[in-house]
Amino acid sequence: MSSLDRCTIHEHDVIVIGAGGAGLRAAIEASAAGVTVGVICKSLLGKAHTVMAEGGMAAAMGNVDDRDTWEVHFADTMRGGQYLNNSTMAERHAKDAPARVRELEGWGAVFDRTKDGKILQRNFGGHRYPRLAHVGDRTGLELIRTLQDHGIHQGLEVFMEMTVVTLLKSGGRIAGVFGYDRDRGRLHVWKAKAVILATGGLGKAFRITSNSWEGTGDGQSLAYHAGADLLDMEFVQFHPTGMVWPPSVRGILVTEGVRGEGGVLRNSEGKRFMFDDVPEAYRAQVATTEEEGWRYVCGDKNALRPPELLTRDHVARCINREVKAGRGSPHGGVYLDIAWIKEKIPNASEHIKRKLPSMYHQFRQLAGVDITNERMEVGPTTHYAMGGVAVDGNTQESTVPGLFAAGEVAAGLHGANRLGGNSLSDLVVFGKLAGEHAAKFAQAHTAVEVDPAEVEAHTRAIEAPFERSGSEGPFAIQYALQDVMQDLVGIVRTKDEMEQALVRIGQLRERCARVSVCGHREYNPGWHTALDVGCMLTISEAITRCALERRESRGAQFREDYPQKSAECATFNLIARKTADGSMEVRRRPLVPTRPDLAAIIEMMK
């Protein structure tokens, strides 16, 4: 019996891999176009990293400050990305985000409200005006709930707790996907005319991360091995504020919404250190006194933003600097203080609980800290990948025909650094676009047949760990890789350390080829990890090679040996691609030209 005969076969016009915000919005749009849609998720439906985007979704609706427009949002996004963004994507995102927020409201999302009944918007780092529509500090959860409730009525077929091992191709085109169910280990093939990747991020390649166990870079790796280009992989965002204590919760996100509501960062000496280091590009927009920063939080349109609301890359490096200088908290972070607002407003405890309910319960239950009275210990945590699958800004199609990508797995919108809140609007804006164009592709093309030999080869590969004997365990390799990436390719990078990382990654790949697992295929976490590690090694190599090639400091990449921006490096993005001999090459790709009208907006907003 061939491996294909052993597989359960499913047939759809469009397959969506991932059921977070981007995947669900893509599936809804494709289904609305009249094609059959299957959704594959690695965990349970509703268990998506989207829920970790707590603070809100950025959209220039002007509900709190009527000076906000799509042009300002566009310019903020481009500046935050250090102008390496795909300007076409940044334009579409800024223009379409308000409609996507109102669409979610129409589907049942319950946003916080202004006194006159409009959707309330809050301040966030890097945004010139209050722009984030939010649901307390549970915005991502509300987005998933809304999309899930709406999506189940659209005729979607959902496959939960499934791992996709490879993308199947025929004649250079996507033919479907191959994978297995995680509980019983049974093989599955999903035939499809088009596939949408919406698998999220890659944070689990690092030791300290806000990402859940699913964030192992599956989509980026699947696309790479299918022949698609990866873009901007050097840019990995370290969110400034993750929990640092106790160890069991190290890395769990502390939303930027805490700072948006007035939270301040202090070192062990009690000093608000963010005032000490404001980049020249933002100096005219940042408060120089605590009082002015507080007036901004309270909605004074003439006040300047507090320095805690600078871009995430900058805040993370400042925290890192304080810790290295010996001015950190007892457990290796700094203090985030929202309790201080008791000096400013009556009933501050109830205000904090109402505005930040998740944060209150998170610290109360996990760390025994009452944030209405005590400071939080926080530190940088690997949070988001700006890089990912290179896509066409108008269709979300990759360089492989029939393969689309949306959300964190796709690259282009955010450039060198993502602004907080742009992730949730990214999901629904480009999820919709990917679904629309994947459906059009499926309607315009006939299906191509799956190659049984390809399925056979991949079946042998995933079953190989059971046939080996030896002491190479998958968890040891995973932990070693996380240490390599955290210590050598982290917040601050150097040529020597990254070259060491490449050597270590190569050694770990050799060990991975010898990894063995015991037991059988049912309920076997060791087997799942053995397969995940292969994805993590691929994306770790791409991050490291691209970071070495970009010999400058820009956005989320900080090179201690090249601490300044380079004019030459401002002219290209980096592409990681699989060569014919199976090795990885990194090439420079000239920036996509910015239309003159968009360039004029950027210049005016400067």
Image (cartoon, grey):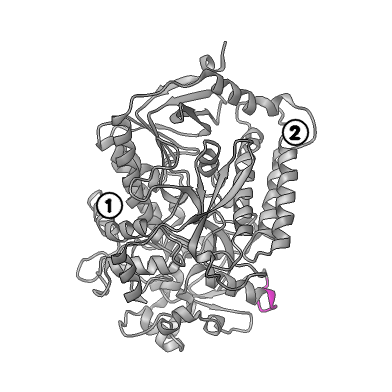
Residue at the spot 62% in from the left edge and 49% down from the top edge: 540
Q: Which residue is mark 1?
A: 104
Quadrant position of residue 63: bottom left
Camera-nearest label, 2 or 1: 2
The magenta-colored residue range is 324-330
Residue 138 in the image: state x and y as whole percent: 40, 58
Q: Which of the two residues, 143 or 600, is positioned nearer the viewer here?
A: 600
Residue 114 picture quarter = bottom left
What residue is shown at x 29% (from left), y 53% (from top)?
109
* Residues packed near mark 1 inside 10 Å, few (<14), some (14 to 19) or many (20 plus): some
Secondary structure of the residue carrying numbered label 1: helix
Circles 2 and 1: CB distance less than 8 Å?
no
Tell me the chief SS of the magenta region: loop
Viewer-nearest residue: 475 or 202: 202
Q: Residue at x 46, y 22 (%)?
A: 450
- Residue where numbered disc 2 is placed: 514
The kind of residue on which mark 1 rests is Leu
Q: Residue at x 35, y 80 (%)?
A: 298
Q: CA distance from mark 2 to mark 1?
A: 48 Å
- Farthest residue toward the top? 1
Pointer 2 or 1: first along the chain: 1
Q: Is residue 290 above or below residue 2?
A: below
Q: Measuring from the top left, give residue 498's x and y in whole percent.
A: 69, 58
Q: Position of residue 551 (x, y in %)?
A: 61, 64
Q: Can residue 198 be seen in the rendering of this structure? A: yes
Which class describes the residues within 10 Å of circle 2: few (<14), some (14-19), or many (20+)? some
Residue type for callout 2: Arg
